[in-house]
Structures are given as structure tokens and as C-alpha cells.
């Protein structure tokens, strides 16, 4: 107790100092703390999983990402300091004032993400905070708090603004509650009750037991996919997860069949039901969950309960009838199994949902329905008591906000209102004071098609396109290229500039994998020359380097933190670090001389860090060129070795963009046409070279189509894995893509068949990669009677094309040392999981899955066919 008392003394001292800080300083501390938490999201997720044995590492990464990036994005511009309202006529001002020392109780189910969330809220509101961790998760909870504190102090915060109880106990938690100025409590009902009984103001949240009501008008395919997504997210430990399903009788059998087709095991026998009832609670006491079942996979749950299920089982549904308190199956579960009830009418479904909520009142409920055609039913649903009423959203991620509805406040502490014995009903945020009931209907994220202002494409386009520079009034041009391209083609560009009387200088120091130091030197020369046009000329490396130099130049010479630009984001519009604006001082023109990266039409740039030799894919629409000149004449002398691998890179762009969770009708057309061009014309372009101008032109156009597609739909794990194997073992990027692409097609297409995880994106309502690959195969004229046969044909076609252009089929064939490859396997897999391209992949990959793909690709293992 003496140590905890000392913690409070230091925290109060820190608070007194921090409460005088201005908004600018607070916001900088908030930002740096969020970045630190974000950068350590995988490390903390692994630590939490190892310590608690609950949940899934990869899903805990999402929660840590959410707790840092999404929370920061939501509150970055929120005023929390000073006068926020003034009415001189009335003579009144309203001023924000911090509370003091927050006592924060952290649960074992979400130890790192909740700690990050609460610490960031405290920093944003100028409060001190003392963390009381759960004994079963103290190491990971404290580590999360330490990481946030270290970054905050480095940014200027008082050194004791965040504290924690080193050895948690009931006595220690009680002391924290009784001595804090306000308690922020997340945990079980007993702990929350203790918080409210402490004698101090408390924000405590009660237990969840969310029902999901499925109406006959619902999109049942989306509903079943989403509910499986939700219950398998971190193995069900999010308190908003659906614990019971109530399904209208008219569609009950169809719903059951859909669940069974998606790797769900249905418990029907009384013997198996009783095994669940017996195993759910300690000593048979309702509400006292058996921790052995919490946050476990469906297979582990089945093993512990004592039933046998198929190896592909991801989710378990237990059929039940009574929704009364004495039915164990109607209570909260926090795992990968749920109860399922049948209702004859919608009114009965509402009543059953209301009964279930008595064992978790005020928290969350969801409804699957055609809302536009059933407004009366939606009104009935709104009579339920939870603070979150979700329509057509997976409950776990839907309830925490800003994922499936962007008006619902993001939070990892969800109030239950007076119905749940809480002081408020909202998602906890900096300004929550009132009991508010929110109806959140699922909405799609915004999508777009963003292209260069002008794209010129035909043989000899180079000469004619330069006339546009007259319109722009260009006076000085800065050319970024490499020495070989400059010697080969440089005169083609400078001649056009001379004709127009445009002054120019050439920077030709770009290497095959452009280094950060190279771009920094180029940016300095650019500032000295002060151009109003920048020309990226050559392969992808030259164009990528030119883009980053342009960004540095446009930033008026101010220091740009490269690592901040390279921070992985979950949503390109909500990233923690925003890119500076471009096109203020100079326009960007890209002229490719190879057919591969598509960089001339994309907002991407891949730069290598000199110190770590790690490749960073930078992505922001401020990097999109204003003009692209695609002149196939420039590719006629490109040798074979620079034709095959880049084109396979472009083909990968097409296929990954086509199945991406962000693909749209706008991007699909470009992806299909690009793939057609490359599949049909690459062999001739490769073998015949300059003799086949048509083939060279078609492949170059195909690469540009691919660039347009993935610039707007993004990529997938072929690129995630390729980036890392290139960085670790120097495998040429396009060649690595060619090896990995068939394995990833097989992996993605098998998601439903093998019990994989569907990616999380609002538009991506149901797993469709098998169907999309099959459609691409049809577009390419491949044969197959079923989707499975068509996907097999697509894989064979990619492998055949790879062999035809003399690329190898395995990393081993490229001479990658086996021992070194296996030694780096764990790190490569983790880095690939965290790559920026992973988020748009249609199958959410587990790190173990990535390792297996790497192993198969190393040895060139045979790919198992779908069709037998």
C-alpha cells in the first residue's frame, strides 16, 4: 500500500504540472503516444496472447491498432483545453478543466488495447492515470502503459503522468478506486459494482450478452458471414459479441444450412447441450464464467466441453429454446460458441431478445433486416434497452464504433446505462457525460477512382505529350532517373525540353532499390534548382524516388520524418500521420521505360531505409503524378531480363486488385483488361522483343491498367510476402510475385472451404474470392465447369506463363540459402502480416498461414487442386 500511495503522490504532482499545458503541446503528446502504441501493436498482441492464452494474436493486433490509430483520428482535433464557448452579450465563458487522477481497472480479455485506449484518453484530457491490471494480464498491461508513457514523456509530458500497480491484488485495486478522482472501470459485474461503491465518481461498464435477431427479410448470406466474423474475432472476447442468435422460423433452416456451409458446428442433441451447460460456469454459478472456455477457438472449446467436431470448425451454435434466467445457454459466453433460438414471429423475436438482455442489460443488440422496407420492425427493435442498437453489422466490431458505422464513437469501454447499473450508456470518450441511446446502421466506407490528370498512350506519345507543358507554363524541369536510362533515352526527353525552351537538370543517381539517402540528396538538389516540373523517368525505382523527392521539395525543406510516413495504416484517410500536400510548387510527370510497376499512375512509392535495409511501401494520393506518358517505343530495347519479372509483377497487380476487399466496378474493368493484355501478349513481347511492337505496346498498356486498378483497390498478401522476401533475401520483386501468386490464389480461394477468416472491411459483406478468381478465369478464356475448376485453370495458367517467360518456380531455384531462409521465416512472416498490402487481402491471414505459404514457395511444393 505504501508503494501505491507513492504512485498517487507522484501522479498528483504530474497532474498539477500537466493541467497547465496548452492544446498544442497536449496534442503533440497525444500524437506521439498514439504512434508509439501503434508501432508496438504486434509485440503487445503477442505478449497479451502468451500471457492470458486468450484470443488470437492477429486480432489483438487489430484491437491495438484500433486503440491507437482510430482513437487518435477521432479525437485529434477535439478541443480539450481552454475556453470553448463564449457569449459576450451574456458575459459567459465555458472552460475545459481536467478532473485529476484517473483510476483505471483493466480486464484480462483485452489487456493491451484497453490500457492504450485509457492512457490516450487521459493524455488528451490532461489527466493523470494509474493503471490497476488484472493479475492474469499484468505483464502485457504494464508493458502497454510503459510504451505510451515513454513516448509521452519524450514528447514533453511529466514523467509520472501514467503509473501502474506492479503487483495487482484486490486490496490494491480497492485502494486505487478509493483514492482516484474518477474511476474508469472495465471488467466483470463484481468489479464494476465495487467501482460504483467506492465513494468516488465512477465510469464503469457492465457485462455484455448481446442478442442478434435475424429477420426473414435479411441478407442471410451477409448475416451469417458477419456473425461468424464477429464471434471468431479474437475468439469472442469483445463484450459486444453476439452471444445468442434469435432467428425467425420462416428462415431458420436456411440460416442453419448457411452456417453449416461456413464451418459452423450445430449442437442438436440434449447430451451435447448439457455438456455445454455444465462447462460454462464455475461451480454452476451463473455469471461466474469458466475462464478455460473464454477466448478459445471452437476446436478448443469442443475439446474442453467434451464433444467431437470437424477439424475445419470455426464456430459452434447450440440450439436452445428457453430464454429464461435458469437456462445457462441464454447467458454471456465470451467465446467462439453461441446459442441459437427460433421465433415464430418478429414480435416473439423481440421478446426473446429482451429476455436474453436481462442477463446483460443495456449493452448491445443487433438486427439483421432489410431496414428500408421494414421501418416498423426497426422501430420495434429500438424499444430494446441497450446503448448500442446495431443494424446489419457484426456486433463485436460494430459495437466499438468507427468500423462498420463511422458516426458511432470509437471506444473500448462500452457503457450500459442505468439498465446495466452504469452511469452512462455511450461508448466512452473524452467528453461522455450523458446517458444516450444510439441506433447505428451499417454504412459503407467511401471509395474512389483517383487518376493522373492526363495519361498519354501510344507509340511516339513522348513527343506530342510535351506540348501540354506550354499550358502549364513550365520554366524549369528536374529529371530523376538512373545512369543507364539516362544514357539510353535521356536525349529523347531533353530534346523535347530544348524545343520548348525549358531549362532542366538531371539527377541520375537512382539505384535499383532507391535508398532514403538517395532521395534526400536529390531533394536537396531539387530545392537548389527550384523547378516547377519534376520528371520521373525510367523504371519503377526512378519514378518512386522522384515522388518522394517531390514530397520533400513541396514541404519547403522542412524535415519530414520518413518513419512517420511509413507507418502502417488501417484506413488511408484516417492514418495517424498525414502527408504534406503536393502540386503547390511543381507538377509531377512520370515516363516509364519498363512494363511493370505502374508507378506512373499510382500514389505509391517503395523506398529502402539505409540503416535497416527494410523496404517501405509509401502510399498517399499526394504522390499521384499529374501526367503520365506511356510510350511503348521506349520499351523496344528493353532486354528479356527486364521484361519478364516486371510483367509478372503487373499481372499480380491485376489479380490482387480484382479480389481486393476494396475492389469496385470501376477498378475491376482495368484489372481484367490488364490481365488479358499481359496473359495474351507477354510471351511474344518477351521472346520477340523489338520485332513485335504490338505485343510490347499491349504489355505496357496492361501494366498501366494494372496500376490504375491497384492504385484504387490496393493489393494483397502476394505483395506483402514479396516485399519481405525481397528485403531479406534479395529476390527480384516480380520474380518473387510470380512464385507466390499461385499459392496465394489457392489460399484465398479456399477461405470458406478451409475455415479461413474473412477480411474486415465494411463493403466486403461475404467471402467471394473463389467466385472472383473464377470470373477472372472466364474473362481470360480459361476452361472449367465449376468455380473450383476455373480457379485450378487460373493457377495453371499463371504457372505456365511463368515458365514460358523463363522465370523460376521456387525461391530455392533462385539459390536462396535454405538455412538462412528458415532462420528468417518467423520474422519474415510477422513483417509480411504487418505489411501495408495485407489489409486489402480478401482472406485475413494468420501468421502461421503466411509461414506455410513461404515454405511451399521456397521448395516449389505442388499446389493441391480444388477439383478432383
Image (cartoon, rainbow, N blue to C red):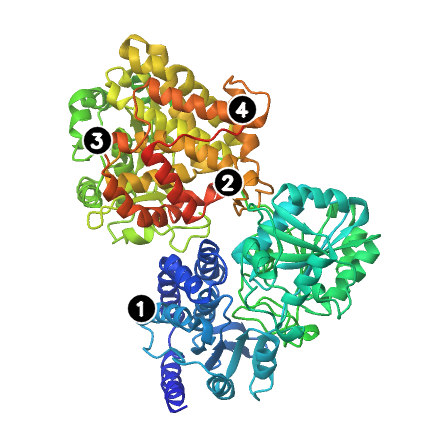
Read off the residue under disc 3.
481
Q: Quadrant of residue 144?
A: bottom left
Q: Is residue 476 visible?
A: yes
CA distance for labels 4 and 3: 42 Å
CA distance for labels 1 and 4: 56 Å
How far across and how far down the image is residue 90, in percent?
59, 78
Read off the residue under disc 1.
155
How far across and how far down the image is residue 169, in percent?
46, 83
Mark before the other along the chain sequence, 2 or 3: 3
Q: Seen in the image, is 491 located left or right of residue 470?
A: left
Q: Residues within 10 Å of mark 3 (few under 14, many from 20)?
A: many
| Identity of the residue furthest to the top in this view | 691
Which secondary structure lies at badge 1?
A: loop
Camera-nearest label, 2 or 3: 2
Mark before the other along the chain sequence, 4 or 3: 3
Q: Quadrant of residue 531?
A: top left
Mark before the other along the chain sequence, 2 or 4: 4
Where is 241 relative to 553, above or below? below
CA distance for labels 2 and 3: 36 Å
- Residue nearer the viewer, 281 or 134: 281
Q: Residues within 10 Å of mark 2 (few under 14, many from 20)?
A: many
Read off the residue under disc 4.
790
CA distance for labels 3 and 1: 39 Å
Mark before the other along the chain sequence, 1 or 4: 1
Q: Residues within 10 Å of mark 4 (few under 14, many from 20)?
A: many
Q: Residues within 10 Å of mark 1 (few under 14, many from 20)?
A: some
Read off the residue under disc 2.
842
Which secondary structure lies at badge 3?
A: loop
Amino acid at each position: 500500500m505504501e508503494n501505491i500511495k507513492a504512485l498517487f503522490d507522484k501522479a498528483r504532482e504530474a497532474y498539477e504540472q500537466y493541467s497547465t499545458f496548452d492544446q498544442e503541446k497536449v496534442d503533440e503528446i497525444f500524437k506521439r503516444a498514439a504512434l508509439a502504441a501503434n508501432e508496438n501493436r504486434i509485440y503487445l498482441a503477442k505478449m497479451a496472447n502468451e500471457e492470458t492464452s486468450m484470443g488470437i494474436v492477429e486480432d489483438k493486433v487489430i484491437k491495438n491498432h484500433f486503440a491507437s490509430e482510430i482513437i487518435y483520428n477521432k479525437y485529434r482535433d477535439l478541443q480539450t483545453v481552454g475556453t470553448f464557448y463564449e457569449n459576450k452579450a451574456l458575459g459567459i465563458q465555458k472552460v475545459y478543466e481536467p478532473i485529476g487522477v484517473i483510476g483505471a481497472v483493466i480486464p484480462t480479455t483485452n489487456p493491451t488495447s484497453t490500457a492504450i485506449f485509457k492512457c490516450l484518453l487521459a493524455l488528451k484530457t490532461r489527466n493523470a492515470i494509474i493503471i490497476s491490471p488484472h493479475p492474469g494480464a499484468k505483464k502485457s498491461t504494464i508493458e502497454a502503459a510503459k510504451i505510451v508513457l515513454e513516448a509521452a514523456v519524450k514528447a514533453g509530458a511529466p514523467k509520472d503522468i501514467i503509473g501502474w500497480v506492479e503487483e495487482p491484488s484486490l486490496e490494491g485495486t480497492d485502494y486505487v478506486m478509493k483514492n482516484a478522482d474518477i474511476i474508469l472501470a472495465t471488467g466483470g459485474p463484481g468489479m464494476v459494482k465495487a467501482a460504483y461503491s467506492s465513494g468516488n465518481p465512477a465510469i464503469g461498464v457492465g457485462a455484455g450478452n448481446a442478442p442478434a435477431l435475424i429477420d426473414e427479410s435479411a441478407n442471410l448470406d451477409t448475416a451469417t458471414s458477419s456473425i461468424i466474423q464477429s464471434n471468431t474475432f479474437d475468439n469472442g472476447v469483445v463484450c459486444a459479441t453476439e452471444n445468442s442468435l434469435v432467428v425467425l422460423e420462416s428462415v431458420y433452416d436456411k440460416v442453419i444450412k448457411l452456417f453449416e456451409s461456413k464451418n459452423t458446428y450445430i449442437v442438436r442433441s440434449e447430451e451435447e447441450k448439457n455438456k455445454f451447460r455444465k462447462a460454462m460456469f464455475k461451480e454452476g454459478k451463473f455469471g461466474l464464467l469458466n475462464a478455460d472456455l473464454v477466448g478459445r477457438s471452437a476446436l478448443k472449446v469442443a475439446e474442453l466441453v467434451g464433444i467431437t467436431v470437424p477439424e475445419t470448425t470455426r464456430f459452434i451454435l447450440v440450439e436452445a429454446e428457453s430464454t429464461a434466467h435458469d437456462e445457462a445457454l441464454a447467458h454471456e459466453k465470451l467465446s467462439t460458441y453461441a446459442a441459437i433460438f427460433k421465433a415464430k414471429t418478429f414480435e416473439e423475436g423481440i421478446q426473446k431478445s429482451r429476455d436474453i438482455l436481462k442477463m446483460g442489460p443495456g449493452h448491445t443488440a443487433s438486427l439483421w433486416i432489410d431496414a428500408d422496407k421494414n421501418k416498423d420492425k426497426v422501430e420495434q427493435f429500438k424499444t430494446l434497452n441497450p446503448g448500442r442498437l446495431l443494424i446489419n453489422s457484426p456486433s463485436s466490431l460494430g459495437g466499438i464504433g468507427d468500423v462498420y458505422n463511422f458516426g458511432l464513437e470509437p471506444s473500448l469501454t462500452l457503457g450500459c446505462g442505468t439498465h446495466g447499473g452504469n452511469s452512462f450508456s455511450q461508448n466512452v470518450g473524452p467528453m461522455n457525460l450523458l446517458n444516450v441511446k444510439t441506433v447505428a446502421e451499417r454504412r459503407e466506407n467511401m471509395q474512389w477512382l483517383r487518376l493522373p490528370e492526363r495519361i498519354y498512350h501510344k507509340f511516339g506519345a513522348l513527343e506530342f505529350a510535351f506540348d501540354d507543358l506550354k499550358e502549364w507554363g513550365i520554366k524549369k524541369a528536374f529529371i530523376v532517373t538512373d545512369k543507364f536510362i539516362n544514357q539510353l533515352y535521356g536525349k529523347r526527353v531533353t530534346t523535347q525540353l530544348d524545343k520548348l525552351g525549358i531549362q532542366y537538370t538531371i539527377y541520375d543517381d537512382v539505384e535499383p532499390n532507391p535508398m532514403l539517402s538517395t532521395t534526400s540528396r536529390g531533394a536537396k538538389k531539387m530545392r537548389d534548382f527550384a523547378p516547377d516540373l519534376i520528371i520521373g523517368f525510367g523504371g519503377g525505382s526512378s519514378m518512386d524516388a522522384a515522388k518522394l523527392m517531390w514530397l520533400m521539395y513541396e514541404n519547403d525543406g522542412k524535415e519530414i520524418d520518413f518513419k512517420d510516413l511509413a507507418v502502417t495504416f488501417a484506413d488511408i484517410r484516417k492514418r495517424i500521420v498525414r502527408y504534406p500536400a503536393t502540386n503547390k510548387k511543381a507538377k509531377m510527370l512520370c515516363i516509364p521505360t519498363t512494363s511493370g510497376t505502374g508507378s506512373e499512375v499510382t500514389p505509391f512509392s517503395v523506398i529502402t531505409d539505409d540503416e535497416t535495409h527494410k523496404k517501405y511501401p509509401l502510399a498517399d494520393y499526394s504522390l499521384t503524378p499529374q501526367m503520365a506518358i506511356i510510350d511503348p517505343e521506349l520499351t523496344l530495347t528493353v532486354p528479356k531480363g527486364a521484361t519478364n519479372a516486371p510483367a509478372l509483377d503487373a499481372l499480380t497487380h491485376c489479380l490482387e486488385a480484382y479480389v481486393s476487399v476494396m475492389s469496385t466496378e470501376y477498378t475491376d474493368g482495368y484489372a481484367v483488361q490488364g490481365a488479358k493484355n499481359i496473359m495474351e501478349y507477354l510471351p511474344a513481347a518477351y521472346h520477340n522483343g523489338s520485332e513485335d511492337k504490338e505485343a510490347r505496346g499491349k504489355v505496357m498498356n496492361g501494366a498501366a491498367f494494372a496500376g490504375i486498378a491497384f492504385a484504387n483497390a490496393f493489393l494483397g498478401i502476394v505483395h506483402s510476402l514479396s516485399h519481405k522476401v525481397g528485403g531479406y533475401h534479395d529476390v527480384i520483386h516480380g520474380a518473387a510475385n510470380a512464385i507466390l501468386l499461385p499459392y496465394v490464389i489457392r489460399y484465398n480461394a479456399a477461405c470458406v472451404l478451409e475455415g479461413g477468416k474473412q477480411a474486415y472491411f465494411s463493403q466486403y459483406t461475404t467471402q467471394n474470392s473463389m467466385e472472383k478468381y473464377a470470373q477472372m478465369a472466364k474473362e481470360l478464356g480459361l476452361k472449367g465447369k465449376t468455380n473450383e475448376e476455373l480457379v485450378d485453370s487460373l493457377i495453371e495458367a499463371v504457372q505456365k506463363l511463368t515458365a514460358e517467360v523463363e522465370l523460376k518456380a521456387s525461391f530455392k531455384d533462385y539459390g536462396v540459402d535454405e538455412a538462412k531462409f528458415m532462420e528468417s521465416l518467423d520474422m519474415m512472416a510477422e513483417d509480411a502480416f504487418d505489411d501495408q498490402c495485407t489489409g486489402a487481402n480478401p482472406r485475413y491471414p494468420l501468421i502461421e498461414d503466411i509461414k506455410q505459404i513461404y515454405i511451399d514457395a521456397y521448395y516449389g511444393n505442388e499446389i493441391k487442386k480444388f477439383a478432383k
